[in-house]
Amino acid sequence: MPGLVGLLVTALIVLQVPAAILVYLDAKRLNAENPLVYFYGILVPAAGFVVVPAYLSKREELPRESADSEPADS
């Protein structure tokens, strides 16, 4: 059984990290406020797969940075 658990944890990491990177890059491209929030939300174990569909369904409605605001440090 420990081998199966290790395999599942590895599979989650292998899937969640690229998904988090893609969502971060997309949020940054859309000039969303705080793109790191979405990145970290996906990396939370077992909750990340809930954040991805929520992000994708609401990505056009994300709050945007104003043109006169300072660029985000990331």
Image (spheres, rainbow, N blue to C red):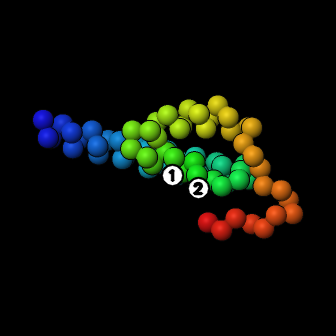
Quadrant showing the C terminus: bottom right
Give left or right: position of 3 versus 25. Answer: left
Is residue 29 something that shows in the picture? no
Residue extending farthest to the right is 68
Q: Which residue is mark 2?
A: 36
Which residue type carries mark 1?
Tyr
Residue 16, position in %: x, y?
43, 44
Residue 50, position in %: x, y?
49, 34
Residue at image location 64% in from the left, 31% down from the top:
57
Which residue type carries mark 2?
Leu
Q: Which mark is residue 67?
A: none
Disc 2 and disc 1 in contact, CB within 8 angstroms: yes
Residue 5, position in %: x, y?
21, 39
- Badge 1 density bin: few <14, some 14–19, many ≥20, Cα 10 Å: some
Quadrant showing the N terminus: top left
- Badge 2 density bin: few <14, some 14–19, many ≥20, Cα 10 Å: some
Residue at image location 75% in from the left, 66% down from the top:
71
Residue at image location 54% in from the left, 37% down from the top:
52
Is residue 8 something that shows in the picture? yes
Q: Which residue is mark 1?
A: 40
Q: Give how far apart the Cα atoms at labels 2 and 1 are.
A: 6 Å
